[in-house]
Image (spheres, grey):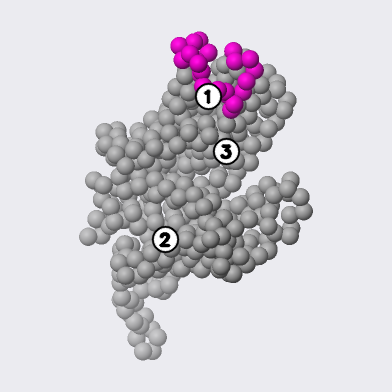
Amino acid sequence: MVESFDIVKQPEDVPFYAGLLLTSYSFCQAIPSMYWGALSDRIGRRPVLLIGLAGDLATFVLFGLSKSYTWAIITRSLNGVFASNSAVVKSVVAEIADDTNRPRMMALLPLMWNVGVVAGAAVGGLLADPANQYPSIFGRFEILRTFPYLLPCLAGSVTTAIGLVTGLLKLKETLVIEPATSIPEAQEDGTATESTPLVAQRNAEQAKRPSFLSLMTPTRKLVLGTNVLLWLVISMHHNLYSMFAATPSSSGGLGFSPRNIGTSLAFTSIAVLILQLKGYQAINAKFGTLKCCQIGLQLMTPVFFAIPFLSLLSSHIEHAYGGVTLSSLPAPENWLSFAALEYCALWLLLLVFLLTRTVGDALSGTSLNLLVANIAPSATTLGVFNGVQQLCTTFMRIIGPVLSGTLWGWSIKHNLAYPFNSHLAWVVCGLVTATAWRLSLKLPDSVNIYLPGQSQRNRR
C-alpha cells in the first residue's frame, strides 16, 4: 500500500514510511485509552463501546479510500483513537462474570485478539488490489481500480458492523452506579437549616471520585509495573524471533526459510489456542491468579537465555552438509545419520522452547489482565485502571520491536564476547522477565480478590 503513494521515491523508503504508518496507529491508540476508560466509569460502558465501534467502522472505511500518504496517516491515526477503547471490553467482561468463570472469560480476550490478527492479515493479503489479483471477478469495478485497498477494509469492517448492530440491540449496561442521594434545599431566604449540607452536590461528586494518582498504592504500582515489563518482553520477542530465525547461523541466527518460520509460529498458535480455551481456567482454579502469573514468568525466563544457543547447533548442521544453509537444506537421504538426527534435535528443542515461552506468555498475560481488574478499588474506577493498562501495553508494543531490532542489529554487527554477541537481545529479554518475576513476588495474596465485586456486594 505504502509503495503506491507518491511519497515513496525508491524501494528502500518503504520500510520507513510503513513503520511510520503503523506507529501512528499505535501511538494514537495508546494516548486516549486511559480517557476512554475514565469516561466509561462516568457515563457507562455501553455508550463508550458503541462510540468506539461506530468510529472504528467509519475511519477504517475511510482508510481504504486512501490515495495519498497524508490521508492514510490521518485516517489510520483516527482509527487508533477509536480502537483504543478496547480496554473497556475488559471492564465489561470483568463485570458480567463472577468468581467461577472470570478466569475463563478473561482468557478468551487475548485469544480473540490473536485470531483477529491472523485473520486480518490473511484477508488483507487475499483481497488487496482485487482488480489486478482477480481481474475476472473484480476487474469490471472501477471503484476497486481507483481504491485498490478498499475491499479488504470493507471486509474487515463487516465484523465491526456486526458488533455495532449487536451492541445496539443486545448489549446492556454492565456498570452499576450508586444513585446519588438527594440533597435538602435551603430555606427561601437562603439561610441554612440543620439538614442543609455544608458541601455542594458537585463537590460531593468530586469527592467521591478521587484522582488516579491518589489510588496508586504500592500494590497497584507493582501490578502495573509487572504488566509493563511483561508486555515489553512480549513485544520484543515477537519481533526478535523472526529476525533470529531468518538470520544466517554464521551471524548468530538459525538460517530458516520463511516457510520454516511460519511452521514454527503455527505450532505455537495452535498451542496457545488449546491453552486459552481449555487449560487456563483449570490451572487458575488450582494455583490462583497471582501464582499463575509467577509460574508464567518463571517458565519464560530460562527460555530467553537458552534459545540463542540453538544457533550453534544450526551452524554445526550446515557444516555437516557442506555449508548448505537450513533454508535450502534438502531432505536427508538417511534420517538415521548423525546430521539428520541433529536436524531433528534442533527442531525438537526449538519447539519445546517456543511452547514453553507461549505457555508462560499465556499464563502471565491472562493473569495480569485479571490482577489489574482485581486491584481496582470499585466499579467506578475499573475503567480507568483497564485504560491505564491498555496505555502501558500499547506503548510497550511500540518500544519493544524498536528495542529488540536495535539490539539485534548492533550485536550481530559488532560480534563481541558473550553476552554482547548475538545473545544480547535475548539476555535483555531474560533479565526483564526475571525482574518482572521478582516484582510479582512482592505482591500480597489479596490481589486474587476482585475488589470491584466486593464493593458492589457491600452496597447491596
Q: Which residue is mark 1?
A: 307
Circle 1 residues within 10 Å: few <14, some 14–19, many ≥20:
some
Query: Which residue reaches farthest right?
Result: 9
Q: Secondary structure at mark 2?
A: helix
Residue 245 vertical position relative to residue 129 in the rendered view, above or below: above
Q: CA distance from mark 1 to mark 2?
A: 38 Å
Circle 3 residues within 10 Å: few <14, some 14–19, many ≥20:
some
The residue at 45%/27% (across/down) is 351
Q: Is residue 386 magenta?
A: no
Magenta segment, which residues?
320-343
Relative side of 55 to 458, left or right = right
Of marks 1 and 2, the one in the foreground: 2
Proximity of marks 1 and 2: CB atoms separated by less than 8 Å: no
The residue at 36%/80% (across/down) is 192
Q: x and y percent of residue 237 in the render?
A: 54, 35
Q: Which residue is mark 2?
A: 159
Closer to the camera, 155 or 450?
Answer: 155
Q: Secondary structure at mark 1?
A: helix
